[in-house]
Amino acid sequence: MSTKPKIAISACLMGAEVRYNGGHKESRLCSRILSEHFDFLPLCPEVAIGMGTPREPIRLVGAAEQPRAQGSVDASLDVTRPLAEYGAQMAAQLDGICGYIFMQNSPSCGLERVKVYQANGIPQRNGGRGIYAQAFCAGRPDLPVEEAGRLNDPVLRENFLARVYVYRDWQALLEQGLSRRALTDFHSRCKYLLMAHHPLQYKALGKLLGSMGKSDPALIGPQYFSQLMAALSRCATRGTHSNVLQHLSGYLKQAISSEDKQEMQHIIGQYRHGIVPLVVPMTLLKHHFRLHPDPYIAQQLYLQPHPENLSLRNGI
């Protein structure tokens, strides 16, 4: 698929003046940089349910697990139900998206640690989740989601966008029709990416597919994909990346000289100890595989889970 992946996003992050005070919260990362690679679909649930701009700000009150969204001045203003219903509606309707970027700390859109006020006016200790975000995510549990503020962390940004592209590939697979062969091939392509994020889950998912037998892939597929997306949401570490780099370099042991092997080990060690970013050993590995192609390695998503010009591995 050559088209850009589509990502839903809180409209205020794209510079739309939809916040309660008539302002915006433009994220230059999203609006200027990522917009070159993704088609953004801006949404504002508060505007969508008929709240004007500017408007009385809302806040979460009550129990952190099931808060209500009420006016911060007029407590009789309660928009909990409309926000939840709109979240469920959007989860059912937005079929073409591969991810969602939410505005942090928002009583409608925040994903975590949103302030939830007790009756005495003091916030609960751990906070909660925005009403719209809660309903949307309940309806689309496998969709990659992240808050805009967390995307400033290079590790979290790379993790989220890698999941977006895997999600996009899975949607393409479903469109072509899910067969046992297609499912096995998809898992094979994900092998080293999965090993970098969650080595134990890589083995568990291999067993799941190994026990598929003559089962209908339409039954196994959704279970497999849910577990895959949960596993990929765990961030890879320098240790797990280094382990994968060692595995990949093993495919070159018959092809490259002892000096090249020594250099490869040295660079992987430098990466493991935080001296160089991941792009350095990756570039060296790709160089050797260009000279000594391996058809199995060539299909691995790990080598290029997202477009190179996003430069996501330069900062991790």
Image: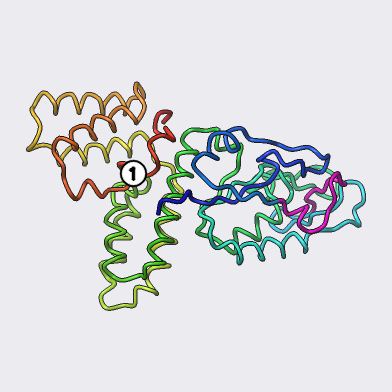
177 horizontally vs 15: left or right: left
Where is residue 198? Give x, y as percent.
36, 48
Q: Quadrant of residue 13?
A: top right
Residue 127 horizontal/vertical position (percent): 69, 46
Residues shaded magenta: 44-61
Residue, x 87% and y 46% (percent of image)?
56
Q: Is residue 130 magenta?
A: no
Name the colouring of the figure: rainbow
Looking at the rendered structure, the number of numbered marks drawn on it comes to 1
Query: In this orientation, which residue lies closer to the viewer: 149 or 169?
Result: 169
- Which element is circle 1 on? helix
Q: Quadrant of the N terminus?
A: bottom left
Against 177, residue 60 (above or below) is above
Find residue 83 and report its horizontal and vertical position in percent. Answer: 74, 59
- 14 to 1, vertically: above or below: above
Q: Is residue 122 left or right of residue 278?
A: right
Position of the C terminus by quadrant: top left
Above or below, 143 relative to 275: below
x and y percentages locating residue 262 in the rendered image = 15, 25
Residue sitting at x 55%, y 33%: 152
Give the residue type that dot 1 points to.
Ala
Q: Could you tell whether 83 is left or right of 215 in the image?
A: right
Q: Which residue is mark 1?
A: 196
Q: Residue at x 39, y 74 (%)?
A: 218
Crowdedness near tag 1: few (<14), some (14–19) or many (≥20) residues, C-alpha within 10 Å? many
Question: Outermost residue toward the front?
Answer: 2
